[in-house]
Image: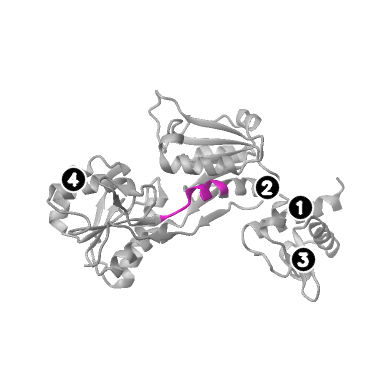
Amino acid sequence: MNAFASQVQATKERMRGLVFRGELPEGTVVREDDLRRELGESVRVVRQALRELAREGFLIRKPRVGTVVGGAASAGRLLPRMRSVGILTGYRESALKSDPFIARVAYGIEQSLLAPRQVTIFAQTPSSKGGVDDPPRLEPDETKRRVQGVIALEANHTPSLNQLVAAGLPVVAVDYYDPAGAFDVSAIDHQGAGYAAAAHLLRLGHRRIAFAGEGPRAGSSDPTWQDRLMGYLRAMAESGHLYAQPLVFDIRFRTHRHIPAALPDWHRAHTPSAYVLCSSRSAPFVLEALGALGLRCPHDVSLACADGTLVEAPGGLRLSRLRVDYEDLGENAVRLLNARLACKDAPPVRAILPVDFEVGDSSRAV
């Protein structure tokens, strides 16, 4: 490839990067002069790149409008399609079927691959003592021979993921991000989730609303829990009901088994009328603790969940919860791998999935 062709190819990749990062949304009129200033390329290079992108369907020429960015379908034709993906998880392989969150994300990943699909699982062994903060270590060159890209699903370890990226392997982390991360991210709007759960309880007239999750922690290994907390705090602050000492019941180390023993004393001391649960998986344990105090949900204490892993709690109680199609997280992860193969030099991308809130039977008006 000669120098001119190389410059054209690089310009095309940078153009794709602008589109995939949302800096040139669908329907945007592409102006040649603006592009030359943005990309620092010559008129001849930019013009040829635009011609080729238009021929490929990435750009569309419209009469009396000009050249515009094509839709997702036309852009998608340019993307390499993934056939072979590795799923890296800090859990055991059995969790890909037994854990509702992981199973649904993994299904979205598999369904987004081009047939014949190949999914390789890199999980903890039955005897391993590792967890989400210490996933299996992959040898980059061997991994590149086996898969086209890696999706880190409950594998919260920036150095390991950055090592794979440095070796030239596309990596997407699901719901884990770090300013020091060189990998792409497919995530839910977790701050919006915490905000939506708290806002729901505020609309019902609750004022002493507690957050059951992780307290403010600079060294947290799970930014999603911190984001849900920030969303709760923002909703409470906007309503004028954020106390000088926020009502936060800290679920230590993100494990739920200690809740029945620790929550009753905490509840007696703070007497909230409602809880935002950072994780819906804590609902059975919270209900057990409240039951030990003779409190019924939602008649005495209301609950709203800032995630949507569980639909029902024990006894058939339908939870007020986040409504998320977790399969979309998996699909977005594969789309990001496709985009990364097309735009190798683009900065890390974070694709955020918007959220909605579903009112259930676990919350009621005061």
Q: How is the image coloured?
A: one colour
Q: Is residue 202 left or right of residue 186?
A: left
Q: Is residue 246 left or right of residue 158?
A: left
> x, y percentage for residue 125?
44, 25
> x, y percentage for residue 56?
79, 55
> Magenta part mainly helix, strand or loop?
helix
Disc 2 residue type (three-letter) = Lys
Up/down of 300 relative to 309, above or below: below
Q: Nearer the viewer, residue 359 or 33?
A: 359
Q: Which residue is mark 4?
A: 262
Disc 1 residue type (three-letter) = Ala
Q: Which portion, as a residue range, is magenta? A: 323-331
State the separation of the CA atoms marked 2 and 3: 21 Å
Mark sitting earlier along the chain (3/4) = 3
Disc 2 secondary structure class: loop
Disc 3 residue type (three-letter) = Arg
Disc 1 secondary structure class: helix
State the separation of the CA atoms marked 2 and 1: 10 Å
Disc assigned to residue 344: 2
Q: Are marks 1 and 4 in contact (CB under 8 Å)?
A: no
Q: Which residue is mark 3?
A: 36
Disc 3 secondary structure class: helix
Question: From this viewpoint, is residue 282 visible?
Answer: yes
From the viewer's perspective, is the residue at label 2 or at label 4 nearer? Answer: 4
